[in-house]
Structures are given as C-alpha cells and as structure tokens.
Amino acid sequence: QGVTQDAAAQGNADALADAGQGVTQDAAAQGNAAAQFNLGTMYYAGEGVTQDYTEAMKWYRLAAQQGDSDAQYNLSIMYANGQGVTQDLTAAVNWCRLAAEQGNSNAQYNLGTMYRLGRGVTQNAAEAAKWYRIAAESENTNAQ
C-alpha cells in the first residue's frame, strides 16, 4: 500500500483511485472514471459525505461520459426517479440503452421493463422480450 500511496502522492490517477477514500476525490477530479463512479456512489448513498443526489449525478455523468456502464445505468435510474434532476424518462432510456449495449445486465433488464411498460419509449412487447432475453443470457436472475 505504501507504493500505491507514493504513486498517489505523485498524481498517478489509478493509484489515487486505489489508495482509499481520502484521495478518491483527487482521482475523480483528475478524470479517473472508476474514482468518479465511486465518488458518485458515496454521494448517492451518503457514505463518508452528506447525501447529495445532485453531486452524485455530477460524478456519475463524468464517469458515464467516459463509457462506464455502471455509471450510465445509475444515471438512468436517477433520471427515471427524478433524483438530483427533474424526472426525464427519455434521458433514462438513453443512458440505460448505452449501458445495456455495453453488456450491463441490470440495464438490459431495465430496458426490457421500460419497453414492456412504455416508460420513456413506445410500448413494444417484442423489444421488451429481446432485452429480457439478452439480460437472461447475461445471467441476470430477474430476467431468467
């Protein structure tokens, strides 16, 4: 761990992400997607910081824009529920689709549900079945 902390002190973003909670924000500010996701999760849950959905949304968005499928999925949930933003089902579907297309099985299942219920998209049973099948093939237990 001393090596990780030394590398973190020298500004190595990956080491910053691994060195612990104290430097997560530094790594996130340097653009490390994993640290951005972790910081978003901390703000979402209020772990070590005051719970703040707006701040969680900010960090999830930064990670999501770098292709982090978990951050994309979490953004979709926050848009669907209006957490930290005005509820926007179209944005929820868009972020969910990005995560689903990268193989995120939770996003695949939720996208199927959005099509089944017509939430943010035109209701489409065939499209719902397609995403449920993909999620089940990805071993998502909800879809099996």
Image (tube, rainbow, N blue to C red):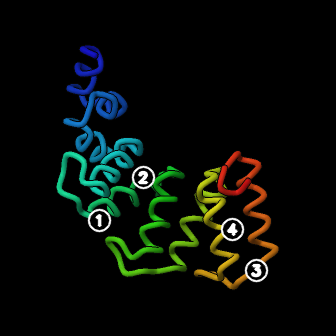
Q: Residue at x 33, y 29 (%)?
A: 18
Q: Which is nearer the N-term, disc 2 or disc 3?
A: 2
Q: Amino acid at mark 1?
A: Tyr
Between circles 2 and 1, the one closer to the viewer is 1
Q: Amino acid at mark 3?
A: Asn
Would you name the residue on which mark 3 appears? 124
Between circles 2 and 3, the one closer to the viewer is 3
Q: Which is nearer the N-term, disc 2 or disc 1?
A: 1
Q: Furthest residue to the bottom?
A: 122
- Around disc 3, counting alpha carbons within 10 Å, would you say few (fewer than 14), some (14 to 19), or many (20 or more)? some
Q: Amino acid at mark 4?
A: Gly
Of residues 43 and 143, the one nearer the viewer is 143
- Image quarter (top left, top right, bottom left or bottom right) of the N terminus: top left
Q: Which is nearer the N-term, disc 2 or disc 4?
A: 2
Q: Secondary structure at mark 4?
A: helix
- Around disc 4, counting alpha carbons within 10 Å, would you say few (fewer than 14), some (14 to 19), or many (20 or more)? many
Of residues 6 and 1, the one nearer the viewer is 1
Q: State the CA–CA distance, disc 2 to disc 3.
A: 30 Å
Q: State the CA–CA distance, disc 1 to disc 4.
A: 26 Å
Between circles 2 and 4, the one closer to the viewer is 4
Q: Which is nearer the N-term, disc 3 or disc 1?
A: 1
Would you name the residue on which mark 4 appears? 112
The quadrant where residue 4 appears: top left
- What label does residue 63 carry, if any? 2
- Around disc 2, counting alpha carbons within 10 Å, would you say few (fewer than 14), some (14 to 19), or many (20 or more)? many
Q: Secondary structure at mark 1?
A: helix
Q: Amino acid at mark 2?
A: Ala
Would you name the residue on which mark 1 appears? 53
- What label does residue 143 carry, if any? none
Q: Secondary structure at mark 2?
A: helix
Would you say the residues marked 3 and 4 are in contact, meaning their CB atoms lie under 8 Å apart?
no
Q: Position of residue 50 (x, y in %)?
A: 17, 56
